[in-house]
Image (spheres, rainbow, N blue to C red):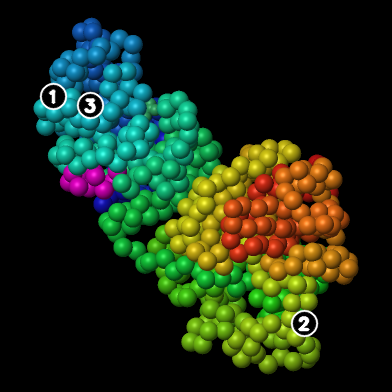
Amino acid sequence: MRTSIATVCLSGALTEKLTAAARAGFDGVEVFENDLLASPLAPEEIRARCADLGLSIDLYQPMRDIEAVPPDEFRRNLRRAEHKFRLMERLGADTVLVCSSVSPLAVDDDALAAFHLRRLAELADGHGIRVAYEALAWGRHVSTYDHAWRIVEAADHPALGTCLDSFHILARTTDPGDLEGIAEIPGEKIFFLQLADAPLMAMDVLQWSRHYRCFPGQGGFDVAGLLRQVIKAGYQGPLSLEVFNDVFRQAEAGPTAVDARRSLLVLQESVGLTAPPAPVVPTGIAFAELVSPDVEPVSELLEALGFTRTARHRGKPVDLWQQGEARVLLNTGPGARRDGTQLAAVGLESPDPAGAAERAESLLAPVLPRRRTPEDVPLDAVAAPDGTELFFCATGRPGLPDWTTDFVPAEPAEHTEPAEPGALVEPPASGTAGGLHRIDHLALTQPWHQFDEAALFHRSVLGLGALDSVDVADPYGLLRSRAVTNADGSVRIALGVGPAPSADDGDRAQHIALATDDLVTAARRFRATGGRLLTIPANYYDDLAARYEFADGELETFRELGILYDRDADGAFRHCYTETVGRVFFELVQRDAGYRGYGAQNAPVRLAAQHVRRPVR
Ligand SMILES: O=C(O)c1ccc(O)c(O)c1
Ligand SMILES: [Mg+2]
């Protein structure tokens, strides 16, 4: 089906919006009246610009407060409509959206509403224009799709149909039975379909609609269930996104348009309209790559954690540090000097790296060059919305490109023969010196305007499942966090976001959580080798003592080492934190098999402790 996007979804001037929509691959747009009014371009010029960009103008909107008003008012409305129809002819738009009236002048009289809409449709017809009547969820007398349809049916004019908007429908009902009436509407009388999702919130519906809509798949509505009914009805028009959202209004139009189109691609797949390459769910974290201009502090930290530098890239200043199954690449190449120490890339162990990349590409993930230098093993990689490079890896699996073959053992120094594929998969002789054996999870703080996009990206592109988002109090704002994981928890990524645009985007913290079976021993070893753990206030431990019972001496040990504790119905979680280098710190975690969380309960205390250690700017 054709895809379309309302100009109100995107930031910027009309021409910027149109360019962004076209670049993201939309077929058409809904032109919002305000965007046209504010544009220096004449309607003919807008029409030409759209044509140049390959965009159709699928809808002009909105027209308000037309129907069921006193005769004088209606006469004025027709005059207004005549103006707009002439404008639409110049624009080359053949469908206009009419919202159900919110005017205090409107009366509760369906027959009158039908009569007025019929008169409007007759006038529109003379200009070759169709009228699509939409029930606003807060309409004065008409606020449901079935009511709007009854009026359209009664008006009985070929140039009059209805517009369905998933927000207005799903904001008013969560009962799938209430959607079944949609399939009863003749498909050709559904003139337009607007799609939006929204987080489930208990608030005034108009405010909810105007500020919190999001793209399908980013909220809590069953947009797919609604779309199935619309398809069942025989609807043939475009799938159009209409999202009013305070964040998207500020964010750059280009990336927002891509996020929007990805959401539609995923929605179309979910109802069986399209069949892109299936997701290939990652089965583990092959490596985390840090780039850093400060080799020494990072190396010292890795050493104190018990990592061993086992290999070096044969062509670049990239070292492989290993401990058990935990692998950290430390890249000190030219790119490293730009932004300080940060987590720049993640290797995801993939059953089918090429298939994973095809899936990602089909969902508009930027594909990265397969080789960083001509000698490198060709690896499939894409960029996540925050710029993190995701490599789809096959570590030591014959027949597939193996990233470890680009590395040669670090010792002895003169040894430069390329290693056999898989040669580095075995833990080095040092084994798990620090008692840490794998990466438990990665935590990536997203740019403030990309949180919803990031969650949708990781779910749809990587096939990970998303947990509910949680709010976490930071001393200087409220953070949101949402984890995405695979089924067995061998891949866990905690996506986070700050409260507002950060003054310095480089502040976005990232961390690597390393798993241990014995946190107390691991923490002691870390300290004994010169590592510094984040200090946690005594008040926290007094509170723990009130909430849980501990074995003799356990709480005192936690207090001494700065270990935080949480539990859910299925198990306990013990964790502590290293100091931060650049944007990056490490977490040491001991997770009982059943525990599913990330210690969010403790995050406010941890965040406050990290602020104490960092100079306030
Ligand atoms: O919030 C509004 O006024 C408004 C306008 C046009 C629409 O299509 C809509 O769904 C809402
Ligand atoms: Mg709408």
Which mark is in front, 3 or 1?
3
Q: Position of residue 511 (x, y in %)?
A: 69, 58
Q: Residue at x 44, y 69 (%)?
A: 280
Which SS type dominates the magenta stretch? helix
Left or right, residue 460 beside residue 144: right
Q: Are marks 2 and 1 in contact (CB under 8 Å)?
A: no
Q: Which residue is mark 1?
A: 155
Tell me, yes or no, if residue 333 can be seen here: no
Using the image as rendered, state which of residue 480 and residue 357 is in the foreground.
480
The disc, 3 or 1, on the residue closer to the chain's N-terminal end is 3
Q: Position of residue 475 (x, y in %)?
A: 74, 39
Label 1: state its secondary structure: helix
Q: CA distance from mark 2 to mark 1?
A: 81 Å
397 to the left or right of 119: right
* Residue 124 percent location from the top left of the image: 18, 26
User: In the image, which residues are magenta?
Assistant: 226-237
